[in-house]
Amino acid sequence: MLTETERKAMLELLHKQVVPAVGCTEPACVALCVAKATEMLGALPEKIEVALSANILKNAMGVGIPGTNMIGLPIAIALGAIAGKSDYQLEVLKDIDAAAVQRGRDYIAEKRIYISLEENAPDKLYVRVNCQAEGRHTEAVISGEHTRFVRLVRDGEVLLDKPACRAEAADEQCHCELTLRKVFELATTTPLDDLRFILEAKKLNERAAAEGLRENYGHQLGKTLCSPLGRGVMGESIFSKILSYTSCACDARMAGAMIPVMSNSGSGNQGICTTMPVVVFAQENHNTEEELIRALVLSNLTAIYVKQHLGTLSALCGCVVASTGSSCGITYLMGGNFEQVSYAVKNMIANLTGMICDGAKPSCALKLTSGVSTAVLSAMLAIQHKYVLSVEGIIDDDVDQSIRNLTEIGSQGMDVTDRFVLDIMTHKHNH
């Protein structure tokens, strides 16, 4: 049984990790840090120096910046200084307009921005910004989480100084040791009014999916699945609708649509992936609103639980984590109990473990669709009490140990893979 203290801590964690974001969260995180340093400076910087961890650099190189028709870090940095508002957190750039974008282009052309790799970053999520103007100087550092400022300095005066490493900041984390059973219990027994806020994720991410279907974004995977070709191959099944709605939202987001999505654990794609499959299945399966709310909480909190052990950024694609959450939610909507939900998790880990993250970009829609298709297959097996056994591969009899096996591979075992991926990405000869 959950204690009231545990229930409260887990609800606070949900509210903290499920938040709106405009555009990819890594460039948004960098823009947020620039906006804060600029605000402390009180003037438009004459020079901005940005040092980034490898994982931030990887995730910000190839993604569209909302409202700009441009890709990558320079415009995100310029707009963070010109029009960013740190109070907006991951929606830092939501007020930009065409004039601001043109000023941003001019700012880039004036060569005021310097971007470098922070070789010895204390965390995989690390951003350090130095701004200068008229002999004045400010520094802002984000580390561990996309909105977690750990250091603020203005003209040599230290205004904030926290541990930069995630491990050293354990006191800032949830004071509740999560397990899958606790996650399931919270989702299925908490009074409905305490969980109803999760419907905002449905509203925002459905809107993003509609936008992806309306316009030609990215590789148009979602639109292709809805086209005569897609319907001819996939039919009009629940399965095809889950894939198309999920990929439509991702197509729009990765191409830089100026529309917020509800993120999960600092990732908009993870928010889409934990939400849209569950929403579409509930609609097609004629589940009640209460069942949908509880399934969405189960999906989102499962992803948060796995991410706590994996880390905010890693070599493992976030769709592995998020689609594991959605498989739990779909299993619940099928009438599954805790045992069947744990089977779904084992099926997911046995299948998707090892999918690399090679940055945020339009082709993320392909990976999300792979994850979500596996989520549906895993749920279908789980509801029939069919699951991968502990004699097979990395699966353990204990579902929480299976999750730790996944996260240890992603956070430690794939470190060398991560370095190889970044090296390939930064040394390509694009023609």
Image (cartoon, rainbow, N blue to C red):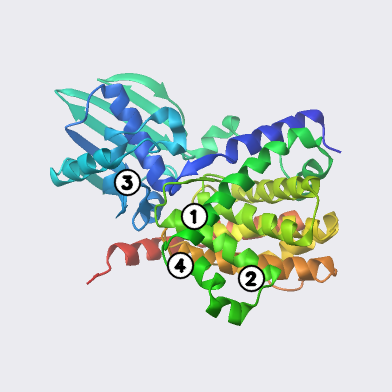
Image position of 121 (left or right of 6):
left
Q: Residue 241: which quarter of the image?
A: bottom right
Q: Residue at x 40, y 42 (%)?
A: 28
The residue labelled by disc 4 is 220
Residue type beneath disc 4: Gln
Q: Secondary structure at mark 3?
A: loop
**Mark number, residue 118:** 3
Residue 321 in view (yes/no) = yes
Residue type beneath disc 2: Ser
First in sequence, mark 2 or 1: give its number: 1
The residue labelled by disc 2 is 240
Disc 4: CA contacts within 10 A as few (<14), some (14-19) or many (>=20)? many
Whether pointer 3 and pointer 1 mark residues with C-beta atoms closer than 8 Å, the reply is no
Q: Residue 151: which quarter of the image?
A: top left
Q: Nearer the viewer, residue 292 or 131?
A: 292
Residue 387 in view (yes/no) = no
Q: Secondary structure at mark 2?
A: helix
x then y, percent, for residue 41: 26, 23
Which quarter of the figure is the N terminus placed in? top right
First in sequence, mark 3 or 2: give its number: 3
x then y, percent, for residue 80: 32, 37
Residue type beneath disc 3: Glu
First in sequence, mark 3 or 1: give its number: 3
> Does residue 154 lie above or below 228 as drawn?
above
Whether pointer 3 and pointer 2 mark residues with C-beta atoms closer than 8 Å, the reply is no
**Mark number, residue 211:** 1
> Does residue 431 lie above or below 327 as drawn?
below
Distance (Cα) linking label 4 and label 1: 11 Å
Distance (Cα) linking label 3 and label 2: 43 Å
